[in-house]
C-alpha cells in the first residue's frame, strides 16, 4: 500500500463528507456553535487508525514524529490532544482541523438509524439548548438531504475494512496511526 495515495483517497472522502455535513447544517440553521470545543473535551471520543492516518502523515512530513510520540505516550490528558483551549471552559479549536477524524466532521447534526431503521436526527445537546425551536422543527425522515452517519462510515470502510473496525480513544488512535506511518517510512519512501 502506498500510504500517500491512501491518505489522498481518504481526504477526498473527508472533503465530500465535510461539504455534505456543513451544507446540511447551514441549510437547517443547526450548526456547531462558534468556538465551541465541548465535544473535544469528552474523554470518550473515539476514532480508528484509518481516520488518523492523514494527521500521522502530516506529523511525519513536518518532522515532528518523535515530539508527538513523547506527547502521546506521556500525556495524562484524556481528551483530544488536538484541542487548543482558548481559556474558557468548552471553548477552543482544533489544531489540525484539515486532518480531523470523521466523528469531528459528522458531529453536531446528523442522521442516524434507530432500531426500526427509521432515520432520526442526532443533534448536539448544546445546539439544542441554543436553538430549541429549530431543533424541534427539524424532521430527518422528511428531508432527503439529511446526511446519514452509517452511509459515511461505510464509505470509509471501502478504503480499508480492517483499519476502520476497531475504535480507540482518540489519542490512542493518533498514536497507532503514527506508529503505522513510521513503520511504512522505514520500508518505503513516503
Image (spheres, rainbow, N blue to C red):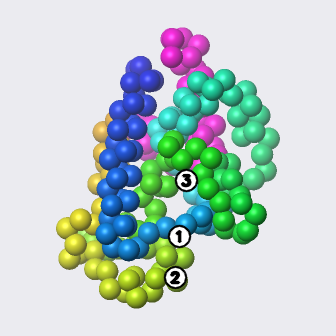
Q: Name the mark on residue 130.
A: 2
Give the residue at mark 3.
Answer: 46
Earlier sequence position, callout 2 versus callout 1: 1
Magenta span dominant secondary structure: helix
Please give the range of residues in magenta: 161-190
C-beta proximity under 8 Å, tags 1 and 3: no
For the residue labelled by badge 3, is the local secondary structure a helix, a strand or a loop? strand
Whether residue 75 is visible here, answered yes or no, is yes
Q: Quadrant of residue 62?
A: top right
Instruction: Tell me the crowding category of disc 2: few under 14, some 14 to 19, or many 20 or more residues within 10 angstroms, Cα based.
Output: few
Earlier sequence position, callout 1 versus callout 3: 1
Give the residue at mark 1.
Answer: 33
On the image, the x and y values in percent for residue 189 come to 51, 11
Instruction: Tell me the crowding category of disc 3: few under 14, some 14 to 19, or many 20 or more residues within 10 angstroms, Cα based.
Output: many
**Image vertical order of residue 108 relative to residue 160, above or below:** below
C-beta proximity under 8 Å, tags 2 and 1: yes
C-beta proximity under 8 Å, tags 2 and 3: no
Q: Measuring 60% from the left and 64% from the top, which residue is drawn there?
A: 35
Query: Is residue 173 within the magenta segment?
Result: yes
Earlier sequence position, callout 2 versus callout 3: 3
* Marks 1/3: CA–CA distance: 21 Å
**Image vertical order of residue 45 relative to residue 125, above or below:** above
For the residue labelled by badge 1, is the local secondary structure a helix, a strand or a loop? loop
Q: Quadrant of residue 4?
A: top left
Viewer-closest of 176 and 142? 142
Query: Is residue 158 within the magenta segment?
Result: no
On the image, the x and y values in percent for residue 25 come to 37, 67
Amino acid at each position: 500500500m502506498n500510504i500517500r495515495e491512501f491518505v489522498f483517497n481518504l481526504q477526498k472522502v473527508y472533503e465530500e463528507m465535510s461539504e455534505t455535513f456543513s451544507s446540511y447544517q447551514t441549510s437547517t440553521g443547526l450548526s456547531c456553535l462558534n468556538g465551541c470545543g465541548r465535544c473535544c473535551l469528552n474523554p470518550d471520543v473515539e476514532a480508528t487508525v484509518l481516520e488518523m492516518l492523514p494527521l500521522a502523515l502530516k506529523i511525519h512530513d513536518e518532522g515532528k514524529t518523535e515530539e508527538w510520540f513523547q506527547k502521546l505516550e506521556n500525556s495524562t490528558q484524556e481528551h483530544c490532544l488536538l484541542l487548543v483551549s482558548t481559556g474558557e471552559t468548552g471553548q477552543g479549536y482544533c489544531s489540525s482541523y484539515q486532518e480531523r477524524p470523521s466523528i469531528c466532521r459528522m458531529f453536531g447534526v446528523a442522521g442516524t438509524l434507530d432500531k426500526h431503521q427509521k432515520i432520526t436526527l442526532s443533534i448536539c445537546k448544546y445546539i439544542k439548548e441554543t436553538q430549541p425551536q429549530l431543533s424541534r422543527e427539524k424532521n430527518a425522515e422528511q428531508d432527503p438531504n439529511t446526511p446519514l452517519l452509517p452511509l459515511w462510515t461505510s464509505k470509509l470502510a471501502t478504503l480499508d475494512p480492517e483499519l476502520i473496525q476497531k475504535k480507540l480513544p482518540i489519542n490512542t488512535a493518533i498514536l497507532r496511526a503514527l506508529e503505522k506511518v513510521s513503520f511504512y517510512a522505514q520500508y518505503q519512501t513516503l
